[in-house]
Image (spheres, rainbow, N blue to C red):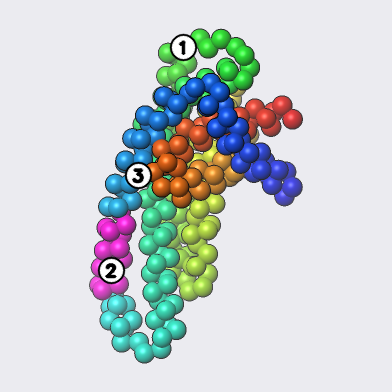
């Protein structure tokens, strides 16, 4: 769909604008402190979960007798398919973990993310930035409600994908499907801070972002790619995503 592709490009370009915006307006203190906390938790979580998920899969295979059958197999290509399927299953489990971890961090960090989004829009429009505790509290509660809703829906989709991952060949594509769904829901959470400020109810926000799926997916894609840049990417990803989402929505409305 051409509009979705255009929105994905706008969302990706917004990260470059977000970087310039942060440098120009000296927002580093709002980026680095939560970013370092996120990076430490993310690193520890990935290490623990990779080991525990590997052990869980190994236990399931041993308990079901599949491991004995695999060792006894002489056809090397069948063994390859089996091992590859095992790796895909572990990757999907990792994505499920990353999804749950991300929402937990979004809930904990919602005061900062609501503030950052509001500050970004105030700077763009050249307005004064009157701090309203009651408004911030409303933003936080809404952010938490939405994060919980998205966690529920995404878990439903991820469990369905997990079942598909057991199907040979078809299961190989499941990590890609899981990542696209993950990108959409992550971008959704980031965009909602702006929707809240524009007085959209939760249901109106869901409908609005549903019409602008490209902005949500594009925002989530770059967030994911930033995790490939070890440490630095992990520190910058959360706050950059919030500011980029605010800028992308502003650019879309302007056009």
Task: State the residue at coordinates (42%, 13%).
Answer: 133
Q: Which residue is mark 1?
A: 132
Image spot of residue 186 (x, y percent): 50, 41
The answer to whether mark 1 and mark 3 are in CB contact below 8 A is no
Q: Secondary structure at mark 1?
A: loop
Which of the 4 image quadrants contains residue 216?
A: top right
Q: Earlier in the sequence, mark 3 or mark 2?
A: 3
Task: State the residue at coordinates (51%, 48%).
Answer: 225
The answer to whether mark 2 and mark 1 are in CB contact below 8 A is no
**Residue bounds of the magenta highlight:** 49-63
Q: Earlier in the sequence, mark 1 or mark 3?
A: 3
The answer to whether mark 3 and mark 2 are in CB contact below 8 A is no
Task: State the residue at coordinates (36%, 90%).
Answer: 74
**Above or below for 137 versus 189:** above
Left or right position of 49 against 150: left
Image spot of residue 54 (x, y percent): 30, 63
Q: Which residue is mark 3?
A: 42
Q: Which residue is mark 2?
A: 58
- 114 or 211: nearer the viewer: 114
Image spot of residue 165 (x, y percent): 45, 66
**Would residue 238 be visible to someone looking at this image?**
yes
Q: Secondary structure at mark 2?
A: helix
């Amino acid at each position: 769909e051409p509009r979705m592709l255009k929105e994905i490009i706008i969302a990706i370009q917004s990260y470059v604008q977000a970087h310039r915006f942060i440098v120009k307006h000296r927002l580093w203190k709002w980026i680095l402190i939560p970013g370092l906390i996120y990076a430490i938790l993310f690193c520890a979580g990935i290490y623990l979960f990779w080991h525990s998920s590997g052990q869980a899969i190994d236990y399931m295979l041993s308990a079901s007798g599949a491991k004995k059958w695999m060792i006894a197999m002489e056809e090397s290509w069948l063994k390859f398919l089996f091992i590859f399927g095992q790796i895909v299953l572990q990757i999907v489990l990792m994505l499920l973990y990353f999804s749950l971890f991300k929402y937990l961090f979004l809930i904990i960090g919602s005061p900062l993310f609501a503030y950052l989004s509001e500050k970004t829009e105030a700077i763009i429009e050249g307005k004064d930035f009157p701090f309203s505790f009651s408004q911030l509290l409303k933003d936080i509660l809404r952010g938490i409600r939405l994060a919980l809703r998205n966690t529920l829906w995404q878990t439903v989709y991820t469990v369905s994908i997990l079942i598909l991952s057991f199907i040979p060949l078809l299961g190989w594509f499941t990590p890609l499907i899981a990542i696209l769904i993950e990108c959409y829901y992550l971008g959704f959470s980031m965009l909602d801070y702006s929707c809240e400020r524009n007085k959209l109810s939760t249901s109106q926000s869901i409908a609005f972002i549903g019409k602008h799926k490209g902005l949500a997916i594009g925002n989530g894609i770059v967030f994911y790619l930033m995790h490939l840049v070890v440490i630095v990417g992990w520190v910058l990803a959360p706050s950059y995503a919030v500011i980029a989402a605010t800028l992308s929505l502003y650019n879309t409305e302007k056009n």
